[in-house]
Image (spheres, rainbow, N blue to C red):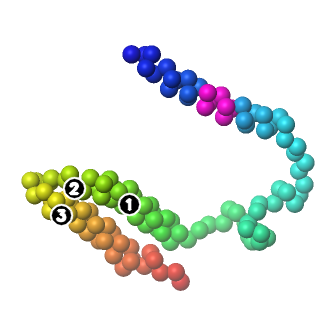
């Protein structure tokens, strides 16, 4: 039984060894000549404005959470779409799968409307 896992263990060992070797070799053989211009953070060609430690508005985080919610929605919808024809929920056949997804989307719409009414999407 353990012999069947041997190729996997060897592959993982090779991956770990090559990752460590690449980082070590690049550190050993790289030419490092620091200058003040090279140490400045790169901001898409623009000079940096202000400090990197300033506070962000909470709305940035709300939009990030909203993005994550809808990203997770897609993650749950993909397997549902792949297995749609095989769904048989409560003995209703395909209709049961549609009802299940309608409830899922309804919960997401309620959350979206809540954020919309709370003003999380208003940029003033």
The residue singled out by tag 2 in the image is 85
Looking at the image, is 124 positioned above or below residue 35?
below
Callout 2: helix, strand or loop? helix
Q: Position of residue 10 (x, y in %)?
A: 56, 23
- Residue 18 is situated, as x and y percent measured from the top left of the image, at 67, 31
Q: Residues within 10 Å of mark 3 (few under 14, many from 20)?
A: few
Can residue 91 be seen in the rendering of this structure? yes
Q: CA distance from mark 1 to mark 3?
A: 17 Å
Q: Secondary structure at mark 1?
A: helix
- Residues under labels 3 and 2: Cα distance? 14 Å
Residue sitting farthest toward the left:
91
The residue wearing badge 1 is: 74
First reached walking from the N terminus: tag 1 or tag 3: 1
Image quadrant where one finds the N terminus: top left
Query: According to the image, label 3 marks what residue?
Result: 99
| Separation of residues labelled 1 and 2 (CA atoms) | 18 Å
Q: Is residue 76 left or right of residue 24?
A: left
């Amino acid at each position: 039984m353990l012999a069947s896992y041997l190729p996997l263990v060897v592959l993982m060992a090779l991956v770990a060894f090559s990752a460590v070797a690449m980082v070590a070799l690049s550190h050993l053989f790289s030419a490092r000549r620091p200058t003040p211009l090279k140490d400045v953070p790169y901001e898409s060609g623009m000079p940096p404005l202000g400090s990197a430690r300033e506070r962000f508005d909470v709305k940035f985080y709300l939009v990030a959470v909203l993005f994550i919610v809808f990203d997770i929605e897609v993650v749950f919808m993909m397997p549902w779409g792949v297995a749609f024809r095989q769904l048989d929920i409560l003995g209703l056949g395909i209709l049961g799968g549609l009802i299940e997804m309608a409830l899922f989307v309804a919960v997401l719409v309620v959350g979206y409307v809540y954020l919309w009414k709370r003003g999380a999407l208003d940029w003033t």
